[in-house]
Image: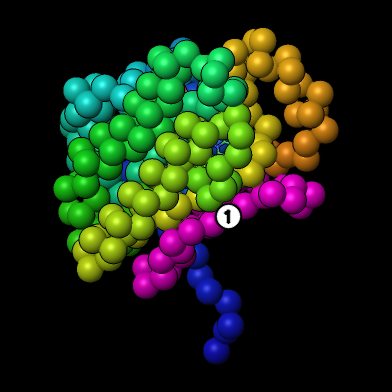
Amino acid sequence: MTSHVKPLTLTGTVAVVTGASSGIGEATARQFAELGATVVLAARRIDRLTQLAKELGNKALAVEVDVADANAVQSLFDQVMSAYGRVDTLVNNAGVMLIGPAHMAPLDEWKQMVDVNVMGVLNCTKIALPYLVEAAKSAPRNVADIVNVSSVAGRKAQPGSAVYAATKFAVGAFSDGIRQELASQHVRVTLVEPGFTDTELASHINPVILEKMQAAMAQMPRMTAHEVADSISFAVTRPAGVSISEILIRPTEQER
Ligand SMILES: NC(=O)c1ccc[n+]([C@@H]2O[C@H](COP(=O)([O-])OP(=O)(O)OC[C@H]3O[C@@H](n4cnc5c(N)ncnc54)[C@H](OP(=O)(O)O)[C@@H]3O)[C@@H](O)[C@H]2O)c1
């Protein structure tokens, strides 16, 4: 008897990855395709998605979507169902981090973080749910997956990122509640909480605030997007009877 646990295949499955136009989402889409999944690439920058879909060959579909817009998300899943007829995996990864002290923050930046980081996750989950439940009843895996990308900020709030943290705490609470609701239907829910990762995320921060943070940020240890994507791939390839509920992943030298 071997002590090795055989990873679950993604061959024959369909995965929707939001925020696949850069960073962790793009890296996840690439890994899923390598592991055999057909990947639906969802984000707003369709040019980037189309380029990535080309690279992934006939196993990818690029769809322009703003996850904050429930009608657009409905149209995304209509397209997925008409192209492939199933959804096995949903990675709610799209997010924005518009940080800075509260007294300097425009209210519309806070609203954008709530709309994308919270409503985006809810819109995609709600609309994908019946398809995930259906996929979990059938071959090849008899299980389906939702992965929600939160942050270390979803566990500990800090000055300057109170609203970003609030959105990620919300993702954590939603994940744990929905995980319990879906357990008996074999839809697994995994919360992934990365620490500092080298992506485009900080590039949208107000330039005045970014300049003040630049020296501190340059010193910070960071992971690659592929290293974080690896934890997402790990979660969705566990045997059908195993559910990884939470992954907190930091660069080795990151203390908090
Ligand atoms: N980088 C880090 O240090 C870090 C740490 C912890 C957690 N995270 C989380 O990781 C996730 C991915 O971020 P990242 O670091 O990979 O940054 P990124 O490279 O900026 O990726 C963010 C992705 O979200 C998409 N997006 C933003 N607004 C959207 C909207 N309204 N509709 C659809 N897609 C939207 C972006 O695509 P478009 O602009 O093309 O729409 C992009 O593909 C986020 O949830 C972030 O909070 C990152």
What range is drawn magenta here? 227-256
Residue at x 54%, y 57% (from the top left corner): 247
Expressed as whole percent of the image width and height from the top left, the position of residue 238 reads 46, 64
Q: Residue furthest top?
A: 208
In terms of secondary structure, where does tag 1 sit? strand
Expressed as whole percent of the image width and height from the top left, the position of residue 174 reads 33, 49
Expressed as whole percent of the image width and height from the top left, the position of residue 71 reads 19, 23
Q: Nearer the viewer, residue 52 or 228?
A: 228
Q: Nearer the viewer, residue 220 or 43?
A: 220
- Examine the rendered structure and indicate whether residue 188 appears above or below residue 169: below
Q: Quadrant of the N terminus?
A: bottom right
Is ligand 1 less than 8 Å from the beta carbon at label 1?
no
> Can residue 63 be seen at all in this image of the molecule?
no
> Can residue 251 be seen at all in this image of the molecule?
yes
Say which residue label 1 marks.
Answer: 248
Expressed as whole percent of the image width and height from the top left, the position of residue 178 reads 28, 55
Judge whether residue 248 is colored magenta.
yes
Position of 220 with respect to 124 (left or right) is: right
Find residue 83 and report its image quarter: top left
User: Residue flagged by tag 1: what amino acid is it?
Assistant: Leu
Position of 2 with respect to 167 (left or right) is: right
Q: Residues within 10 Å of mark 1 (few under 14, many from 20)?
A: some
Find residue 114 and report its image quarter: top left
- Examine the rendered structure and indicate whether residue 177 appears above or below residue 218: below
Residue at x 22%, y 41% (from the top left corner): 126
- Examine the rendered structure and indicate whether residue 235 appears above or below residue 4: above
